[in-house]
Amino acid sequence: MSAELIAKDKRFQLNSPNNTLKVKVSMGDSITYSISFKNKTVILPSAIAMVLQNKVLGKTTQVNNIRVIKNKEFNELSVLFSDQNYSLIFRAYNEGVAYRFVTSFKDSIQIVAEKADFNINGKPAAILQETDNYTSWEGPYIKYPSIAEISNGKRATTPSLFDDKSNGIKVVIAESDLFGYPGMYIKKQGDRYIGDWAKFPTKTVMGSWGDFVSVVKERGDYLAKTDGSRSFPWRVIIATDNDKDLLNNHLVTKLARPSEIKDTSWIKSGKAAWEWWHDAMLPGASIPSGMENRNTDLYNYYVDFAAANKLEYMMIDAGWSNNYDLTKVNPKLDVQGVIKRAREKKVGVFLWCVASTLLKDLNKNLDFLNSIGAAGIKVDFFDRDDQEAIQWIELIAKEAAKRKLMIDFHGCSKPTGLEKTYPNIVNYEAVRGAESDKWDNTIDPDHHLIIPFVRMLAGPFDYTPGAMRNKTKAEFKPIDPGLPSGQGTRCHELAMYVIYDQPLGMLADSPTEYEKAPDIMKYLSAVPTVANETKVIDAKLAEYAVMAKRKGDNWYVGAMTNWTPRNLKLNFSFLKPGVSYTAQIYTDTKDSDVNATQYELKTISVNSNTRIDLKLSSGGGAAIMIEKSIFKK
């Protein structure tokens, strides 16, 4: 049976549709759950509860009703508790297990605390983005050989990954469908991890960067005040013994609420030219450039570059308007004229703004952005995920959608599926991205091969790839201000456009750098940011990844390795049998280990029976464009 009740001691069991995952729920003086994967315990009995002002949800033995739902995607167990006005819902998917509380109180409620324990079996290795605060999701990941080595009280963002080397099972802790409630971290407590949340802010001041970030000075003794009748976030546990599954697991998105936007025809994915990473420098251009010359002529150059290379967008970052009043436009820039010119060339324009400034008068500011023709906005510097900040994010998405404005959230907490509910959200940051190349060496190929296996499980991220000054490990040095470099080979950088989930993808480097390499721009112009189909060809956690994505009839392949050079075999069996294709293959060369900008481009005929060897340099990669063949059989 997919779900069963053992009435004697109130124990329930729920299986995934393929029976690989099993969750057991025990209800006595408290509620606990445990999870097994292929009959191996991955989560030992762990407590669940939610503490309200006047009662505790989860300390009851009175079960009023049990409902089981079965379908192809998941099996669901819903337990309604007598006279308590709440339910506890478990779902078992093939990809993972999730649970949530649902309440039906007449009046509003105050959540004092939540108990979400994750008693992970054994002493697995861990990959965590740790934090001492509740303000940052952009730190480097730390690899621990065993959770026994992690100090008590250490906090980490979610998703967090645990790797049991003895059986190859990976367990990821995450959350989904977060709204009107603080985001979840996990914290080491003894032998287990527990859920941890920022308490409600009771006193804030403007501070931090430029005195335009809302900084919490005091917090209350509760997590949230909220409607009494609502569902709470899903607590998600993903388990697999196949690293490939981590690269194409969309459980967080599946669990999120459906779209609130009926007409989504105006929401379009795409790539964008962008000036900030390379300090708006255009070496060799006929016009003055650099951050001091962010004016109409400069941005028209970016518009022309985007249009010439079939990029759907350009991103105008900080500096186009006043940080404290976005309606005060930089007098050197005719932003409305640039947007009008861009529209005529079928290029949409995104405009950067500060979250606190936007929120000062949200309707007025969004109306202004809409009136000057912006296609979307990049909203930055939330730096919080307490209840208030999470409410801000949803409110901005909702009100922007009314004006047909897309959103790229930056300085924000990790996604939890809100981009499904409001598909005008086309990307989030919440990752240590390419900007760090300006300041340190933390985002190297080792980092590049962690984030798709861990952070990408939460949803898309705006890493901002596209570096054209590619450096080896020995050569790399941070540069700020000026023209920064990227760590790893040119082909490693190109592969990010396939492997990374980014509905709005930046081309971070200078247009004049791309213009030196027309064959690179041919690839960057063509590679899609959203695919119709994804195949993970080969992968090993934190070491390498090979993925293929189909858009229409064409396929795109990306392969990346960490600092370890390796040979990978690429099997083209994902192609349609009996059809001949033309593949343009960008690969590292024998010299890429010492000159990371070096690459080789070959064009060959391939079909579903083709096999090739990919030789990836240290920090290397490969990128392939595959079209229906122009060759005659």
Image (spheres, grey):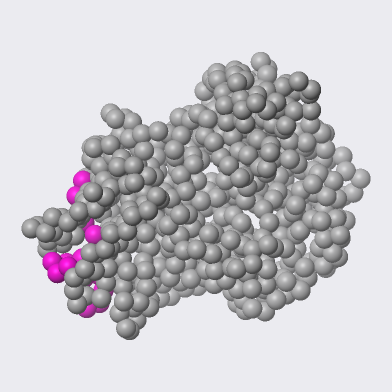
Q: Where is residue 284 in the image (x, y as percent from the top left)?
A: 87, 39
User: Quarter-wise, where is residue 448 in the image?
Assistant: top right
Give the farthest residue toward the right: 286
Give the farthest residue toward the top: 590
Q: Which of 14 and 399 is in front in this view?
A: 14
Span shown in magenta: 44-63
Determine whether 309 is above or below 132 in the image.
above
Q: Where is residue 157 in the image (x, y as percent from the top left)?
A: 41, 51
**Rendered residue at 76%/74% (across/down):** 371
Answer whether residue 185 is visible to the viewer in this image.
no
On-image quarter of the C terminus: top right
The magenta stretch spans residue 115: no
**Rendered residue at 52%/23% (across/down):** 564
Determine whether 581 is above or below 485 in the image.
above
The magenta stretch spans residue 50: yes
**Rendered residue at 49%/41% (across/down):** 248
User: Quarter-wise, where is residue 57 in the image?
Assistant: bottom left
**Rendered residue at 13%/66% (across/down):** 61
Q: Position of residue 630 (x, y in %)?
A: 79, 28
Q: Is 464 left, or right, of 5 in this rendering?
A: right
Q: Nearer the viewer, residue 91 or 170?
A: 91
Q: Which of 499 and 467 is in front in this view?
A: 499
Q: Which of 626 and 341 is in front in this view?
A: 626
Q: Is 259 left, or right, of 69 in this rendering?
A: right
Q: Is the magenta stretch mostly helix, strand or loop?
A: strand
Q: Position of residue 87 (x, y in %)?
A: 27, 68
